[in-house]
Image (cartoon, rainbow, N blue to C red):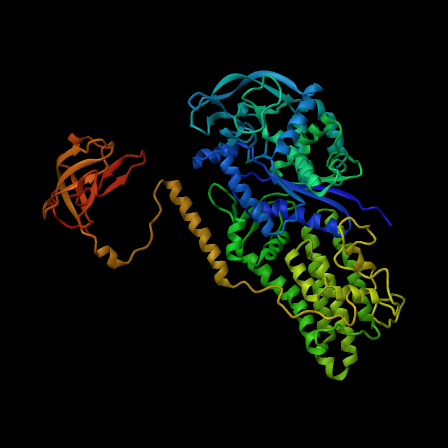
């Protein structure tokens, strides 16, 4: 019996400045979840760790935009993000947050140790400063032209166009993201991690040591940074939001978020271990533990260069075995953009597809951006569901369940002598755990999912070839064996699908009643009497079998006893005489109207973005023609104007509208003086119900237009000969 292997699996900490979308799910959280679930099914000891990154500059930008505090921002989005992960059953062992006390303590301890051991460089240098905002500008508070590719909207720490990492002072024509001003340079003291001192070690450890097992996109980026020459990188910043630098003389400074955030993996592990009564240190300090970081490509530098250097400098931590970073996922051929609302948000997806979490997991995995940027479309989403999940996986399971109930009242029949086809089919079933494992172990999750579907295809082909619905009258004993074999495949699918389709797996296990005591007792009795034509025996007459599956399995069992491997080792997965549950459909078709609704939503977003870019207000809600005909709009002339006392915006006007002279109160005082509007031709909505403003009854509304500079302009007729009272239609 082998000892379970230990895995620490981390998923990139999401910024709590907004909800999570399908790009996050496809790039990081679904592949990490597949890997973690798989390792548990293999019987390994897993700590799957994540949490909210709450100290990034995007948090403060969001707070300024919404007019609330950074703490209010992180509290709001931490809750939204955590619930979305729970709703999709992303199986974190712990989901923490970097505002937690244990994280502040852990990050501070790491900094102090490196500080005390002289691992930092202390420098006073010039950094960008916004005089108007009266503050130093952290990297994300600066935008400018990338010095490498010329992209004009590069951030101060990294260019999103070419991926180059740089300092804010490297930008060409930098601008403050707070005020739009051109910043000045001002001296300030900070501590730096000397990455250049670890350059040779990094090259040996990654470029040479992991050339065969790390993904080409990861190695390519790392090699590019190393070849360009690494430089010291600041670990502190002049900000008031974050973890205070825990040394004297650092007042008003916080730990830089890239130093703070990855330590969140460690503090989250500590939090989990304390809750579960475990020792956290083996998961981060035992050389036999395998540490794997799942990230997007924009985080490669932090997880492959900066964080490993931090761990190396600290001295007691293990280093990552692999960093399987994915590329980006586009949406309907356009880059996903939070600021432009061009995304499919997880919480909104669940409002429209409340029971289809697995469909999205499937579509994102089947089209995962593993080696290059990929594209999500709603039509492909529909096709994946209807043509694959429904037509292949669901179709096989439904036929097996329906026929078992129709022929045997839902009781697993006892197999007779196995034919060559039966034995070949069962032998293929036994091979699938290893086939799928081979792909998952190489982080090829699309390939692994395809192999899972190939097992469902095997089941469909077996039923189509053996045609039990035709043989039931002529050879009912043969049909018992066919259905027995088909039920073994269905059981195998219920287990092997768990990493990819956890909701489907649980539903199928429930239908097959694999978690009920009756099933386990049946396994213990070894009730399957199968006569085989070869030595590859599927079941025996013995009263028990050490290779029988017992579901569920415990985490941390030995590899030989793991649920995953039982498919290959067990003589029977589902015993004859076992009663299965009622037939339920695993998947339902997605109709064209459901997809069109999503496309219409995106089209509305696209039009809103165009309108915003043009500076024009979007169209208001549609009205009926009869509503329009009720409006009495006439040409008038302003005869008198006086300011309304104790107001900045209001003018009291006397306007000749042809049918009478009426009093109108209008909020135009900041755009026009009293003197310049006397005699001005205006357009007046005359039949608006009177309204009292600051004690003055207003009997209409002057129609105005907004100008690009934020001022107001009169809407006046082009023909100056038009008389007062003429209607506009």
Q: Who is closer to the viewer here, 10 or 109?
A: 109
- Compared with 663, 521 (above or below) is below
Whether residue 405 is visible to the viewer of this picture, yes or no, is: yes
Q: Please name whichever residue, 543 or 613, is drawn nearer the observer in this view of the structure.
A: 543
Residue sitting nearer the eye, 668 or 282: 282
- Which of the 4 quarters of the picture holds residue 573? bottom right
Is residue 323 in sight in this rendering? Answer: no
Q: Residue at x 59, y 16 (%)?
A: 249
**Residue furthest bottom as drawn:** 474
Decide: is 238 above or below 526. Answer: above
The residue depicted at 74 percent of the width and 49 percent of the height is 39
Q: How many marks?
A: 0
Q: Is residue 43 left or right of residue 10?
A: right
Point out residue 389 in the picture as x, y percentages from the top left corner. 63, 62
Q: Quadrant of residue 193?
A: top right
Residue 322 image position (x, y, % from top left) = 72, 39
Expressed as whole percent of the image width and height from the top left, the position of residue 248 reads: 61, 17
**Residue at x-position 24% and y-position 34%:** 649
Please provide percent x and percent y for residue 653.
15, 38
């Amino acid at each position: 019996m082998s000892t379970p292997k230990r895995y620490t699996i981390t998923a990139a900490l999401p910024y709590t400045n907004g909800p999570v979308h399908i790009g996050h799910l496809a790039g990081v959280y679904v592949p990490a979840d597949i890997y973690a679930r798989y390792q548990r099914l293999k019987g390994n000891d897993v700590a799957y760790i994540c949490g909210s990154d709450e100290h990034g500059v995007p948090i403060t930008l969001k707070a300024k935009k919404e007019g609330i505090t950074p703490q209010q921002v992180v509290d709001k989005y931490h809750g939204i993000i955590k619930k979305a992960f729970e709703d999709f059953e992303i199986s974190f062992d712990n989901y923490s947050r970097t505002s937690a006390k244990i994280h502040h303590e852990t990050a501070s301890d790491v900094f102090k140790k490196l500080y005390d051991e002289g691992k930092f460089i202390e420098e006073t240098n010039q950094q960008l400063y916004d005089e108007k905002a009266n503050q130093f500008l952290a990297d994300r508070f600066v935008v400018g032209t990338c010095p490498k590719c010329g992209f004009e909207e590069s951030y101060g720490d990294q260019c999103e166009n070419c991926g180059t990492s740089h300092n804010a002072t490297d930008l060409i024509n930098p601008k403050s993201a707070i005020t739009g001003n051109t910043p000045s340079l001002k001296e300030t003291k900070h501590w730096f991690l000397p990455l250049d001192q670890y350059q040779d070690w990094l090259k040996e450890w990654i470029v040479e040591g992991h050339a065969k097992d790390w993904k080409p996109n990861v190695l390519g980026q790392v090699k590019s940074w190393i070849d360009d020459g690494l430089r010291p990188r600041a670990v502190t910043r002049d900000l008031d939001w974050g973890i205070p630098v825990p040394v004297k003389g650092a007042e008003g400074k916080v730990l830089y978020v890239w130093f703070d955030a990855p330590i969140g993996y460690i503090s989250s592990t500590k939090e989990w271990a304390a809750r579960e009564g475990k020792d956290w240190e083996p998961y981060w300090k035992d050389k036999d533990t395998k540490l794997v970081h799942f990230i997007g490509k924009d985080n490669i530098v932090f997880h492959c260069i900066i964080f490993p250097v931090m761990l190396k400098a600290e001295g007691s931590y293990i280093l990552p075995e692999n960093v399987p970073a994915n590329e980006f996922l586009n949406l309907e051929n356009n880059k996903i953009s939070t600021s432009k609302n061009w995304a499919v948000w997880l919480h909104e997806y669940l409002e429209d597809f409340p029971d289809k979490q697995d469909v999205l997991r499937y579509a994102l995995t089947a089209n995962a951006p593993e080696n290059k940027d990929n594209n999500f479309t709603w039509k492909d989403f529909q096709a994946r569901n209807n043509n694959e999940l429904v037509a292949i996986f669901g179709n096989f399971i439904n036929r097996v369940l329906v026929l078992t109930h129709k022929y045997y009242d839902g009781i697993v029949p006892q197999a007779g002598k196995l034919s060559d086809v039966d034995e070949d089919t069962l032998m293929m079933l036994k091979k699938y755990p290893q086939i799928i494992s081979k792909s998952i172990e190489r982080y090829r999750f699309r390939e692994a999912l395809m192999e899972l579907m190939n097992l469902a295809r095997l089941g469909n082909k077996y039923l189509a070839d053996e045609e039990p619905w035709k043989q039931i009258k002529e050879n009912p004993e043969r049909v018992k064996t066919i259905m027995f074999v088909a039920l073994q495949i269905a059981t195998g699918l219920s287990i092997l699908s768990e990493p990819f389709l956890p909701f489907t797996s649980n539903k199928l296990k429930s239908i097959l009643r694999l978690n009920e005591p009756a099933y386990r007792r049946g396994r213990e009795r070894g009730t399957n009497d199968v006569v085989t034509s070869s030595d590859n025996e599927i079941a025996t007459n013995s009263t028990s079998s050490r290779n029988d599956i017992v579901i569920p399995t415990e985490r941390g069992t030995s590899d030989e006893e793991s649920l995953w491997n039982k498919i290959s080792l067990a003589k029977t997965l589902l015993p004859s005489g076992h009663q299965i549950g009622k037939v339920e459909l695993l998947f339902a078709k997605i109709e064209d109207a459901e997809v069109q609704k999503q496309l219409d939503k995106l089209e509305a977003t696209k039009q809103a973005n165009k309108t915003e870019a043009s500076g024009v207000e979007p169209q208001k809600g549609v009205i009926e023609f009869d509503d329009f005909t009720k409006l009495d709009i006439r040409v008038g002339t302003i005869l008198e104007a006086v300011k309304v006392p104790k107001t900045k915006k209001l003018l009291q006007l006397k306007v000749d509208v042809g049918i009478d002279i009426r009093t109108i109160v209008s909020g135009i005082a900041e755009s026009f003086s009293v003197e310049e509007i006397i005699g001005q031709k205006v357009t007046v909505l005359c039949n608006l119900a009177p309204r009292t403003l600051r004690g003055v009854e207003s009997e209409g509304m002057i129609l105005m237009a907004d100008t690009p500079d934020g001022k107001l302009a009169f809407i006046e007729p082009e023909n100056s000969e038009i008389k007062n009272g003429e209607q506009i239609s």
